[in-house]
Image (cartoon, rainbow, N blue to C red):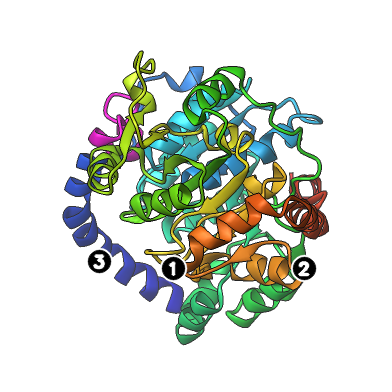
Amino acid sequence: MMRFIFLLIYNLLLPVFLLVSIPGYLIKMKRRGGIGTGLRERFGLYKRKKSEEPQGGLYVHAVSVGEVFIALKFIREWQKTHSEPVVLATSTATGHQVVRDAALPGVRALYSPLDVPGLSGRCLKRFNPRAVVLIEAELWPNFAEACHRRRIPMVMLNARLSPRSEGRYRKVRAITSLLFSRLTALGAQNERDKGRFAGIGVKEEIITVTGSIKFDVLGDTPTAPREEFRTLLSTMAAGKPVVLAASTHAGEEALIATAIREAGAFPLIVPRHAERRADVVKDLTAAGFAPILRTAGDLPAELPQNLCYVADTTGELRDWTALADVAVIGKSFLAKGGQNPVEAIAAKVPVVFGPDMTNFADLVTLLNAENSVWQCEKEELATTIRRILTDKAEADARKERAYQALSVHSGATKRSVELVETLY
């Protein structure tokens, strides 16, 4: 009865939420190039015939670009031992583009259906998956019910739960336990996450600690620096060390670039959202820089003074990181939560971030315990960068300790595959 009441209220309120949010969502999709890429699939409208769709394979659901990269990493490991087709569903244009760009054989890029009654069942009937994989905490009530009715096992991988989220979920534990009861298995990132999920009502017997796929870097093939990128940076930096400002948010581009300039290095900026390019250029120009956008094409014949380079693209952060002498992590100085420093650590690049890294609290605790990264206030950033560039021995020691700190997650991708195999 309680489940019925919860779903009834949810399905009464959801249409109101969609009416308010969908116009903004469509505007965002247009701005990010999502119109014309199959966005109608979110509303249960498909261009392909059902007979042309992959049947009886694995259905993987991811949302953000970061979750899509985790899903792709899992799928690559899965395909080493499985030949069945895979459907990879996402709800954003950028995530959908990343799936298409990856061009993995046997993988169908899909826009996930809106979580309204009927659409989830229509989608599952169309692809008839043998199992559903949810990346991190993406669990929608109607989709979960549709899987349950069709007896499709559903596993959540790379699952994590922050203390703040745990506190919110505990307040509605009766509801969260109902929702999570539809899961067949859950792969938690660590023992703390296992305890948090158990604390909000997930049955402990379905929780397995698999580690973090995102932090499972030791088995990755290191990114080989792209020569065209190396040539570009060599031309622009003119012998200066290159400092990367990674996944920056509003206002951080000018702040970090200024600190990089004061430290005597060349600023390479990779904003979190490429569509912010106009605001990024405006802020950098006001700070006395002459920014050049990657999307502008070739470099001018004569490079301006106070040059900085803005890689306003999606999916190339790893390539730029491989060529940096230092990486400064965005969303940690002027915004809240921080961005993921793992790509820089995996590339063995010294890492600096600001005071607020609450989205990665467990990881930062691990890294700080090993004295393997630098964390500072914005006023100390220039001094910190200069120190890293000056004391190479200390920088080398810290980046190696950071790399080793992630070794506890080595094999997480394979363990996640093995967990799904127990249900498949």
The reply to whether the C-beta atoms of the residues labelled 3 and 2 are less than 8 Å apart is no
Q: Quadrant of residue 122?
A: top left
Q: Distance between the residues labelled 3 and 2?
A: 47 Å
- Camera sees residue 156: no
Residue 35 forms part of the magenta stretch: yes
Residue under pointer 3: 13
Q: In this view, does 43 lie to the left or right of 259?
A: left
Q: Residue 294, how many percent across, how many down?
A: 39, 26
Amino acid on which disc 2 is placed? Glu
390 or 100, nearer to the observer = 390
Quarter of the image holding residue 11? bottom left
Question: Which residue, as the protein is rendered here, is positioned at the far bottom?
Answer: 171
Q: Can the viewer see residue 138?
A: yes
Which residues make up the magenta segment?
A: 29-42
Q: Name the residue under label 2.
A: 370
Does residue 102 sit above or below 131 in this rendering? above
What separation in Å lies between label 2 and label 1 (alpha carbons)?
24 Å
Residue placed at 44% from the left, 68% from the top?
A: 379
Report the residue at 30% width, 71% height from top. Answer: 9
Discs 2/1, front: 1
Q: Residue 379 carries which label?
A: 1
> Which numbered disc flags the more N-terminal residue, 3 or 2?
3
The residue drawn where x is 70% and y is 56% is 212
Q: Which amino acid does label 1 sit on?
A: Glu
Secondary structure beneath dot 3 equals helix
For the residues carrying marks 3 and 1, which lies nearer the camera in this image?
1
Question: Where is residue 81 shown, x and y percent of the image?
Answer: 81, 31
